[in-house]
Amino acid sequence: MTSTPWSSRSEATLLRATSRRRTRPGGRSRLAVGEPGSLVGTSSGGGVELTRGPFVSFVRRIFPEPDEREASYLGDLFRKETVGGALALAAAVVGIVWANSAWGGSYQDLRHWELGPLDVEHWAADGALTLFFFVAGLELKRELVVGSLRRPADAAVPVAAAVCGVAVPALLYLAINANGGAMEGWAVPAATDIAFALAVLAVVGSNLPTALRAFLLTLAVVDDLIVIAIIAVFFTDSLDLAWLAVAVATLVLWAVLQRLRVSTPVLYVPLAMLAWWAVHECGVHATIAGVALGLLMRVRRDAAEEVSPAERVEHLLSPVSSGIAVPFFALVSAGVVLSGGGDLVRDPVVIGVVVGLVVGKPAGVLLGGWTVARFTHASLDPSIGWRDVVGVALLAGIGFTVSLLVSDLAFSGPERDAAKAAVLAGSVGSAVLGVLVLGHRDRFHATP
């Protein structure tokens, strides 16, 4: 998932808020202590200040300030949808090639290398993807409060498309696996990888209406919300009530700090780590902590603030999510050993996932969107038509990251590898079909 670009005005405002500098003797500049954009600073909205002290001084000695031009360039680079998608795809390819090479044993050793309480595979799924889902939670909160989901009438068509886009592939999977198949994988083809889908749209759709991107974004955000709920409800085996109470308490404290306009990460970072560990230990998948924390961030700015806390945090963390966390998960999770090709093709798990992504996902998106537009007062944006939506519906079949995560949760052993291979095949197929359709529509919209 990648963050939603702001308007040029909002981007300029954020850059002003994060680029104030004080100049040291000799002409070198640095971030001003206590200004918005410094990692430890005050809230311009009158919140609690915590900018000095032994802990802050210690952190600054350990982590010197980076070169401004390098940090700005890398941050802007990793915020681009195409770059984040390309990095994750490259990491997945490296994982597949590595797992199927003569050095495949070292790949498996890496995945199962114990680092503290978890191995690398679980750090990727439970740790790295928590950051991914935190950014997703920020996006969802912004869309709900100030974005495209703020007015239900405007969001009705893509929301209905998202709901049916989850239901239809799941039902197709269940139908294909009804006779003795692995029914527990029904949620694998239900997901959409927002980062990859938007990256493909950005590459192929230079002349497509901006409303089409908004449609895909709304669809994918709602899709993510549904899949997150599925993970929380259907993939939680048991609950440790004591750890659950700790998790709830940390989330409440997080919300209180947001309400009090406390802005320092000296409090938020340890609290987020405690929330993550408590959710992990209580039996719920740890990524739910990321979503919950993101949803509790404040997205409306105060009168004295240039940008909201959610915008500032998203601007800071989205490059880390798309440039490091998601590629790391793709590298560790996508390395499927591709053996027994004939058996894979006939495996009902593989058939169910591929058909669900390539056929069920676009069919559900189109069915849900068209039904609401046909029988209610809701409608598509005037600048786009249903032929454009066909291309976006195909891109919704790119499950990749989230589908790989659900595969890890639903299966173990050979079935998990089969499901992952199907996710990769179905995602590639959906991307190719989407590129073909949207490429044609892009040429149509480019015609005067």
Image: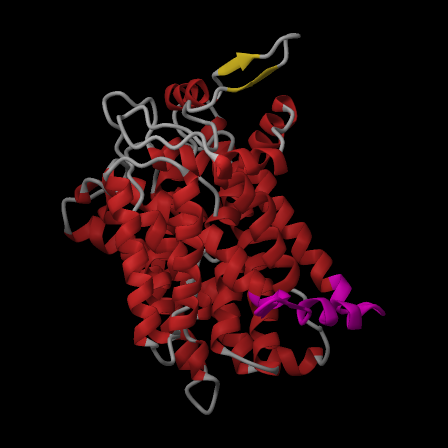
Q: Residue furthest front?
A: 54
Instruction: Report the side of 293 relative to 414 (left or right).
Output: left
- The residue depicted at 48 percent of the width and 43 percent of the height is 2
Q: How is colour applied across the structure in the image? A: secondary structure
Confirm whether residue 393 shows in the render.
Answer: no
Closest to the observer, 284 or 229 = 284
Image quarter of residue 307: top left
**Residue at coordinates 57% horizontally, 39% vertically from top-left?**
82
* Residue 176 location (% of width, % of height): 45, 81
Q: Is residue 98 magenta?
A: yes
Residue 123 horizontal/vertical position (percent): 57, 63
**Could you tell me residue 385's position as x and y percent?**
34, 40
| Tally of numbered tags | 0
351 part of magenta stretch: no
Q: Does 233 sit left or right of 127 as displayed?
A: left
Magenta stretch bounds: 97-122
Q: Residue furthest bottom?
A: 180
**Closer to us: 239 or 50:** 50
Q: Name the residue: 48% across, 73% down.
A: 409
Q: Is residue 421 above or below residue 432?
A: below
Residue 253 at what x, y percent from top left? 28, 51
Q: Residue furthest top?
A: 26
Between 171 and 375, the residue placed more toward the observer is: 171
Q: Find residue 209 and report its image quarter.
A: top left
Q: Height in image: 16 above or below 405?
A: above
Residue at 48 percent across and 60 percent down: it is 402
In front here: 283 or 33? Answer: 33
Asked if one can make out residue 213 in the rendered structure from this viewpoint, the answer is yes
The image quadrant where one finds the C terminus is: top left
